[in-house]
Image (spheres, grey):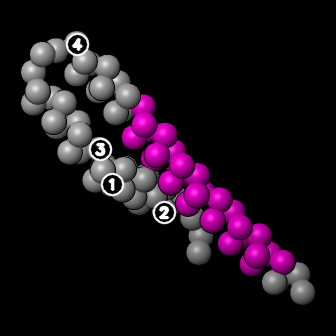
Amino acid sequence: MEGIWQSRQVMMVSAGVIGGAFVLGLLVHHLIFKMMQNLARRTQATLDSSLIKHCRGPSKVILPALFIYILLPLVTL
C-alpha cells in the first residue's frame, strides 16, 4: 500500500511541476507582449504592430512548451 501512495505522490509532484511550467510560460508571454505593445504604441511604424499581432498566437503555444521542455528533466515520471 505504501508503494501506491509514494507513486501517487511522485505523479502529483510531477504534474505540479509541469503545470507550473505551463503557467509560468503563459505569464512570461503576457509580460513580454505587454511590454512590446507599450513600445509599439510609441512609434508610428506599422511593422512593429503587425509583428506583435501575428506573433502573439504562435508564441502563446511555444513559450509554455519551451518552459515545459526546460523543466522536464527535473520531473520523475
Q: Earlier in the sequence, mark 3 or mark 2?
A: 3
Height in image: 57 above or below 45? below
Image point 54% across, 49% down: which residue?
Answer: 23
Say few, some or many: other residues with alpha carbon within 10 Å of mark 2 (under 14 / 14 to 19 / 20 or more): few
Element marked by disc 1: helix
Q: Main secondary structure of the magenta part?
A: helix
Judge depth for marks 2 and 4 and give the one in front: 4
Q: How far is mark 2 from mark 1, CA to CA? A: 18 Å
Residue 71 at x, y = what percent? 49, 56
Q: Which residue is mark 2?
A: 73
Q: Earlier in the sequence, mark 1 or mark 3?
A: 3
Inspect the magenta stretch and tell me whether residue 12 lies in it.
yes
Q: Are marks 1 and 3 in contact (CB under 8 Å)?
A: no
Height in image: 47 above or below 43? below
Residues rendered magenta in the picture? 5-31
Can you tell which mark lies on residue 62? 1
Residue 49 at x, y = what percent? 19, 30
Judge depth for marks 1 and 3 and give the one in front: 3
Inspect the magenta stretch and tell me whether residue 18 lies in it.
yes
Image point 16% across, 15% down: which residue?
Answer: 43
Image point 29% across, 27% down: which residue?
Answer: 36
Q: Which residue is mark 4?
A: 42
The amino acid at mark 3 is: Arg
Q: Are marks 2 and 1 in contact (CB under 8 Å)?
A: no
Which of these two is toward me, 39 or 67? 39
Q: Earlier in the sequence, mark 2 or mark 4?
A: 4
Q: Earlier in the sequence, mark 2 or mark 1?
A: 1
The amino acid at mark 4 is: Arg
Residue 8 at x, y = what percent? 76, 76
Q: How far is mark 4 from mark 1, CA to CA? A: 27 Å
Q: Residue furthest bottom?
A: 1
Which of these two is toward me, 21 or 30? 30
